[in-house]
Image: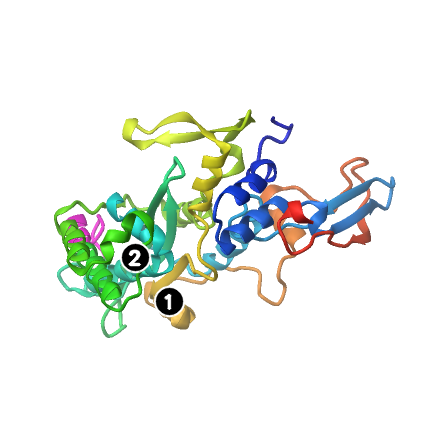
């Protein structure tokens, strides 16, 4: 089963989602994500009918679900976010640093997603801020964006945080800019050791304050001595932190952000086919020289793996710290530009925001307002199509 547009996550959910929901205990947040993706850009969500004012060509467009886990709803959201971040970029080097926890922690993390992901962000941010303030490394207040990803290429759980870090920072008295040396200003081993210590310490505090739950296969960790033994073993394991070379200018930073910020577990273009209840998709095997391979899973298992990465309600997966923290970001950026002798990049003001049609034209070069048939007329909305859906899963509507 592969249409001209290719197989999509929505196709898999529509065909196999009803049986999956019947045979598994699916949390409410997962049900909502599945329902939204299945209904996305269908008559269930309503839409509008456009007509060409020259040739009379009719086009029906259905509304998107806007769910942050939907493969089809991230494009314009991502571009708008990046456009806003462009104003924050400074004429300096930026580094890409990735923090990963040992795989043996994944079952505990998955069962306590909101708590554990917050601990991960807290440990990463405190590690970078503490070490950047240290005169041995930089002695300045740096800034960075943290982006949570929870998946590997095979769709299994692999929580890690990508950081875009300024190559320097404000001096303690905020009277000059402190540039870092050629490489990243904090040795990876130092980063890894402090990150490990902070995460394990906060994990212990969460256990003592009874914030953690221990269902199923991790039930034995409820016992204090068992949990402590489990926790302490990770002091002797390798915690992977790596730093990639600095980005090639501001354009390099923007290209990176466009790839990572609003990415989901799997995009539709990676899915090759859906045949006889099996899903085949492309993936990269980093343990085998980064080779591109094809993985085939039962539809049931594909859905299970996809849902591993549905985030808790209202969980913020992109966070700003230091100079880029939301509260004082504008003032900090203005001061940094002054100290660096840099002028702010001219951007379209907030008083004239781009429409979604203008965004699409700017990004893709496609003018959605022009008639695709006669190429001369303008598509004008002539009818609003009201939603058909109810509040339950599509099979109940």
Q: Residue at x 21, y 62 (%)?
A: 204
Q: Is 191 one of the magenta-colored residues?
A: yes
Residue 244 horizontal/vertical position (percent): 28, 43
385 and 253: which one is in front? 385
Q: Determine crowd level at label 1: few under 14, some 14-19, many 20+ residues with C-alpha closer than 10 A.
A: some
The reply to whether the C-beta atoms of the residues labelled 2 and 1 are less than 8 Å apart is: no
Q: Is 206 one of the magenta-colored residues?
A: no
Classify the position of the N terminus by image quarter: top right
First to last magenta residue range: 180-193
Residue lying at the far bottom in this picture: please name it.
Answer: 173
188 and 32: which one is in front? 32
Residue 308 horizontal/vertical position (percent): 42, 46
Horizontal placement of 68 versus 58: left or right? left
Q: Which residue is mark 1?
A: 325
Q: Quadrant of residue 9?
A: top right
Any part of residue 231 in sight: yes
Q: Quadrant of residue 226?
A: bottom left
**Label of residue 120 in the image:** 2
């Amino acid at each position: 089963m592969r249409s001209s547009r290719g197989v999509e996550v929505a196709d898999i959910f529509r065909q196999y989602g009803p049986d999956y929901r019947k045979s598994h205990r699916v949390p409410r947040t997962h049900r909502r994500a599945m329902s939204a993706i299945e209904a996305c850009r269908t008559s269930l969500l309503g839409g509008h009918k456009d007509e060409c004012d020259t040739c009379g060509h009719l086009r029906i467009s259905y509304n998107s679900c806007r769910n942050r886990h939907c493969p089809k709803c991230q494009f314009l959201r991502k571009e708008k976010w990046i456009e806003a971040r462009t104003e924050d970029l400074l004429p300096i080097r930026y580094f890409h640093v990735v923090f990963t926890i040992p795989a043996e922690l994944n079952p505990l993390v998955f069962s306590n997603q909101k708590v554990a992901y917050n601990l991960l962000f807290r440990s990463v941010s405190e590690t970078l801020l503490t070490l950047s303030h240290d005169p041995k490394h930089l002695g300045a207040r740096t800034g960075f964006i943290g982006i949570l990803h929870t998946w590997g290429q095979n769709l299994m759980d692999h929580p890690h945080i990508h950081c875009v870090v300024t190559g320097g920072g404000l001096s303690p008295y905020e009277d000059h800019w402190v540039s870092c040396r050629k490489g990243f200003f904090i040795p990876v081993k130092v980063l890894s050791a402090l990150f490990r210590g902070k995460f394990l310490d906060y994990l212990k505090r969460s256990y003592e304050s009874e914030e953690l739950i221990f269902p199923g296969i991790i039930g034995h960790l409820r016992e204090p001595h068992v949990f402590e033994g489990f926790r302490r073993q990770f002091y002797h394991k390798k915690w992977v932190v790596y730093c990639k070379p600095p980005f090639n200018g501001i354009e390099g930073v923007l290209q990176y952000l466009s790839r990572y910020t609003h990415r989901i577990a799997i995009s539709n273009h990676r899915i090759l086919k859906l045949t006889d209840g099996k899903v085949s998709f492309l993936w990269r095997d980093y343990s085998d020289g980064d080779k591109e391979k094809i993985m085939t899973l039962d539809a049931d298992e594909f859905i299970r793996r996809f849902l591993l990465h549905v985030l808790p309600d209202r969980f913020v997966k992109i966070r700003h710290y230091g100079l880029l923290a939301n509260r004082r970001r504008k003032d900090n950026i203005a001061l940094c530009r002054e100290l660096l002798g840099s002028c702010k990049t001219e951007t379209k003001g907030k008083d004239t925001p781009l429409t979604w049609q203008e965004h699409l034209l700017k990004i893709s070069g496609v003018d959605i307002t022009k008639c695709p048939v006669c190429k001369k007329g303008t598509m004008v909305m002539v009818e609003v199509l009201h939603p058909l859906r109810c509040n339950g899963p599509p099979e109940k509507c």
